[in-house]
Amino acid sequence: MRNLTPITDHPLLAVWGDSVRARRIVGERITFAVVEMAPGADVPEHHHPAEQLGMVIEGQVDFRIGDETRTMGPGGTWRIESEVPHQVKAGPDGAVVVDVFSPPRADWDGLPMVEDSTPRWPRVE
């Protein structure tokens, strides 16, 4: 894998069906992902061993981590410690978020690739 690439060179993965898709870059100890959420996309409560940090790039999300809930727009950030239950729902216009996981999300290795991979972000003019 090359070290310097545009995010759009990475395959688009169906993370939660058609409503939540992501492009990722995997390092030795970290996964970086740009996640595209369709309007109203719902990521049900789940947890994983990876610690997760993230930020909203565009749109809006309703996020719950443990018993804390917040609606966030661009610039809103989160920190999820290992194995803490969390869920998220995209706003009416959908959202684009950046997520970073450590250790890498090996469970994403078997996700299907999306054929129509026109990115929501960055916008292609």
Image (tube, rainbow, N blue to C red):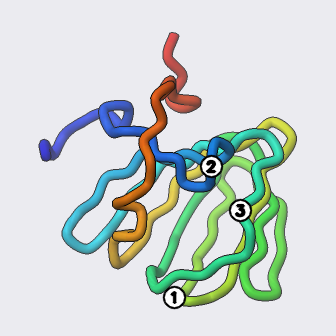
Residue 55 in picture, x, y percent from top left:
59, 57
- In the rendered image of this protein, does residue 57 appear above or below residue 86? above
Judged from the image, the secondary structure of the residue bearing numbered disc 3 is strand
- Residue for badge 3: 43
Q: Residues within 10 Å of mark 2 (few under 14, many from 20)?
A: few
- Residue for badge 2: 17
The outermost residue toward the left is 2
Mark before the other along the chain sequence, 1 or 2: 2
Residue at horizontal 53 percent and vertical 47 percent from the top: 14
Viewer-closest of 30 and 115: 115
Q: Mark 3 or mark 1, which is nearer to you?
A: 3
- In the rendered image of this protein, does residue 46 appear above or below residue 120? below
CA gap, disc 3 and disc 1: 17 Å
- Residue for badge 1: 82
Residue at horizontal 19 percent and vertical 40 percent from the top: 4
Residue at horizontal 60 percent and vertical 43 percent from the top: 36
Q: Quadrant of residue 103?
A: bottom left
Q: Residues within 10 Å of mark 1 (few under 14, many from 20)?
A: some
Asked whether the residues under the numbered discs 3 and 1 touch, taking CB atoms below 8 Å apart as contact, a structural biologist would say no
Q: Quadrant of residue 101?
A: bottom left
The outermost residue toward the top is 125
CA gap, disc 3 and disc 2: 10 Å
Residue 31 in picture, x, y percent from top left:
35, 63
Q: Amino acid at mark 2?
A: Gly
Residue 43 in picture, x, y percent from top left:
71, 62
Mark before the other along the chain sequence, 3 or 2: 2
Q: Amino acid at mark 1?
A: Ser
Asked whether the residues under the numbered discs 1 and 2 touch, taking CB atoms below 8 Å apart as contact, a structural biologist would say no
